[in-house]
């Protein structure tokens, strides 16, 4: 029953929407709803100072500037806020525990390589000596050219060829604290050889292959069979090699990474304690270790449930930091070792909150029956009259029986159609009755204490389909690839009750191109989302949140939908905002080039065709001009739906 349809009940409010979409629990305080029912970004503008800006206001101002939907909106203030939160949380935990070491963050470039994201992380991160973690030569080049602060770390993971190693050694010559983390024993030979050649000592770390296994989607990254890291024998080889080369003093860092999005803090603690054992024994072997790098894994609560579900986490950043400091401190104190500098490589937790995918709804398909006639013609086949009879007499007490009958008569109708005994118009009447009957069943279901399992998923099957102007494959690849849940909600009309249960389809026309994993209040996990009535001619905007990590470069060109428009916004202290960066998404010509067409050739071939048609008298010269102009404009245009 819709709240607003009953005048005795209070009107739907912003608080109702806030609860329904569970904003408080996934937004980390960065989003809230205004009294007018618009979604606000609560942008931290200075220490302890927040300014609210409406996302609809931002959308409007972007459209005035020619940046159409879909848009990936980056909120630069949030990049700063995340870096601040992680660093300040570690600082607070260090102070509270009287831990004697320091914290150094290193942002893993692979999580979001976009140049202005990295520059902002480096620019703001400088005050905390927040560095970068790189896993390839390309990423190392980014670090070398972007970073200035020589107190910040550059952590080189991944397989390293000679060029990679030479680049890292040059960073050492320039004065950067650039660590090579050894992933396999053969790397050490090359590093030693090149450092002798170039006359500079390397900073060396080793990646551990831990026994601890973690829960969540990335559990394969952990345990004996994990793809990366040195086992105990290999570690010994590395130590012996460094000892024999009199370079053991270069071995200063121990690294491990248990996988991304670790939902259970117990796993983190367990892995860390194991790593500490290695750290202690490596010190006993004579390595002058000073850094313990705990990798990534700090999870984001996409569902807002504070649980061990794979899309959530049972801890917050403060608890994460406190647990880590405590575990390391206890381990070191037990062996009277100095407290190491703690390094973490949080990627997801640093950038997930900082981007929102915004799109408009283009159309809606509803599974609603048309008008039901009072009587059916005399010659109506029996299964259809039976269907009508059942549809009109559905009662909660016999709901399962009614459902069975409906399914039975409907399949009889379909058989008649298949045998050619009834025509399309007759089937259409039956289908309408069928839909009417299912709707009745769904309506009466809500009055039942126990819902028969067979009809449980009926509401989902009858959910409206809202078509969004975006591509899941391009913009939310993890939603498709690993069923990642992202918070989704309309960004306006939030003082109005959303009365439609819906799934959201993209415009790729691919059956996988849809959002159908949602998390909202009351239902931890749902295949549908409540949305507002869509009115033709009025814009309806939806946001997908927490999409700043991993989504952009994993995206693909399914159906040749290209990069979306991108806008980076910085909110100022006077509540205005600056468009600090804009990027026009791919044109059709761009995406055609990616799959090796030559737009110029396509255009010329098409023009020749049009000219041929003029010669043959099939079109006029004016028509030819119109056609080739449209072709040319399309090549230049956006790959998404344009008004
Ligand atoms: C991917 C990766 C990270 C980032 O992990 P998050 O869970 O996103 O923080 C950190 N370190 C290494 C070595 C990685 O491969």
Image: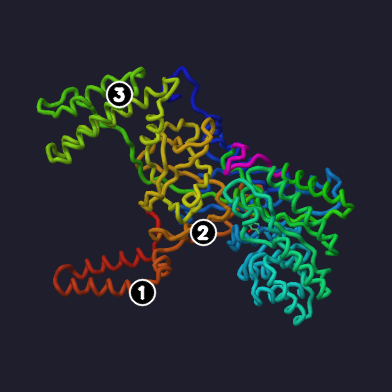
Which secondary structure, mark 1?
helix
Mark 3 neighbour class, 10 Å CA radius: few under 14, some 14 to 19, many 20 or more: many
Callout 2 secondary element: helix
Q: Residue at x 19, y 26 (%)?
A: 373
Q: Nearer the viewer, residue 563 or 55?
A: 563
Q: In this view of the protein, which residue sits in the foreground, 195 or 56?
A: 195
Residue identified by numbered label 2: 554
Furthest residue in direction front, as rendered: 233
Q: Measure how far apart labels 1 and 2 are at the Cα level.
A: 29 Å
Q: Which secondary structure lies at badge 3?
A: helix
Q: Which residue is mark 3?
A: 402
> Spatial distance from mark 2 to mark 3, Cα to Cα?
47 Å
Q: Is 462 placed above or below 477 here?
A: above
**Residue 502 percent coordinates (x, y):** 41, 38
Q: Is residue 186 visible?
A: yes
Please name the residue that numbered disc 1 is placed on: 600
On the picture, is 180 further left or further right than 443?
right
In the image: residue 544, left or right of residue 367: right
Q: Main secondary structure of the magenta part?
A: loop
């Amino acid at each position: 029953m819709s709240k607003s349809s009953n005048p005795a009940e209070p009107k739907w409010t912003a608080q109702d929407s806030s609860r329904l979409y569970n904003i408080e629990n996934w937004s980390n305080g960065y989003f809230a709803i205004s009294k007018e029912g618009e979604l606000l970004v609560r942008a931290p503008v200075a220490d302890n100072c927040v300014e609210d800006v409406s996302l609809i206001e931002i959308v409007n101002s972007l459209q005035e500037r020619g940046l159409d939907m879909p848009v990936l909106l980056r909120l630069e203030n949030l990049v700063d806020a995340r870096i601040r939160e992680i660093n300040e949380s570690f600082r607070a935990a260090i102070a509270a525990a009287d831990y004697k070491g320091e914290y150094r963050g290193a942002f893993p470039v692979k999580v979001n390589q976009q140049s202005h994201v990295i520059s902002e992380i480096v620019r703001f991160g400088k005050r905390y000596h927040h560095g970068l973690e790189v896993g390839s030569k390309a990423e190392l080049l980014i670090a070398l050219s972007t970073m200035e602060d020589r107190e910040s770390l550059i952590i080189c993971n991944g397989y390293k060829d000679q060029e990679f190693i030479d680049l890292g050694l040059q960073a050492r010559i320039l004065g950067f604290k650039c660590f090579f983390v050894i992933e396999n024993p053969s790397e050490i030979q090359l590093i030693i050889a090149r450092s002798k050649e170039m006359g500079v000592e390397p900073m060396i770390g080793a990646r551990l292959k831990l026994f601890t296994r973690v829960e969540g989607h990335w559990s394969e990254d952990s345990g004996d069979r994990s793809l990366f890291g040195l086992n105990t024998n290999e570690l010994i080889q590395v130590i012996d090699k460094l000892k024999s080369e009199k370079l053991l003093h270069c071995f200063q860092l121990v690294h491990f990474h248990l996988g991304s999005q670790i939902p259970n803090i117990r796993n983190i603690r367990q892995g860390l304690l194991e790593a500490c054992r290695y750290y202690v024994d490596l010190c006993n072997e004579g390595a002058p270790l000073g850094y313990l790098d705990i990798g990534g894994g700090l999870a984001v609560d996409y569902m807002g449930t504070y649980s061990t579900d794979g899309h959530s986490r049972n801890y917050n950043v403060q608890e994460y930091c406190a647990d880590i400091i405590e575990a390391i401190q206890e381990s070191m104190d037990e062996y009277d070792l100095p407290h190491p500098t703690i390094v973490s490589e949080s990627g997801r937790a640093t950038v997930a909150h900082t981007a929102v995918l915004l799109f408009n709804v283009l159309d809606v398909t509803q599974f609603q029956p048309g008008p039901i006639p009072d009587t059916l013609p005399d010659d109506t086949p029996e299964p259809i009259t039976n269907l009508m009879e059942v549809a009109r007499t559905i009662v909660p007490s016999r709901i399962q029986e009614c459902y069975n009958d409906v399914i039975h008569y409907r399949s009889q109708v379909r058989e008649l159609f298949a045998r050619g005994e009834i025509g399309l118009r007759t089937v259409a009447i039956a289908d309408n009755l069928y839909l009417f009957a299912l709707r009745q069943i769904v309506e009466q279901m809500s009055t039942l204490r126990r819902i028969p399992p067979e009809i449980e998923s009926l509401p989902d099957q009858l959910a409206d389909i809202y078509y969004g102007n975006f591509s899941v494959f391009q913009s939310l690849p993890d939603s498709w690839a690993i069923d990642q849940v992202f918070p989704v909600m309309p960004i306006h009309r939030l003082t109005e009750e959303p009365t439609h249960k819906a799934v959201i389809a993209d415009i790729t026309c691919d059956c996988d191109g849809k959002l159908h994993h949602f998390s909202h209040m009351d239902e931890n996990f749902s295949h549908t989302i409540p949305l507002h009535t869509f009115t033709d001619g009025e814009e309806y905007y939806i946001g997908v949140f927490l999409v700043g990590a991993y989504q952009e470069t994993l995206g693909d060109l399914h159906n040749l939908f290209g990069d979306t428009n991108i806008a980076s916004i910085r909110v100022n202290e006077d509540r205005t905002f600056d468009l600090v960066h804009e990027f026009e998404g791919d044109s059709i010509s761009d995406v055609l080039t990616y799959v090796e067409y030559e737009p110029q050739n396509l255009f010329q071939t098409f023009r020749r065709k049009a000219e041929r048609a003029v010669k043959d008298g099939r079109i006029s010269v004016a028509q030819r001009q119109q056609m080739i102009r449209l072709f040319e404009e399309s090549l230049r245009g956006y790959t998404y739906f344009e008004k």
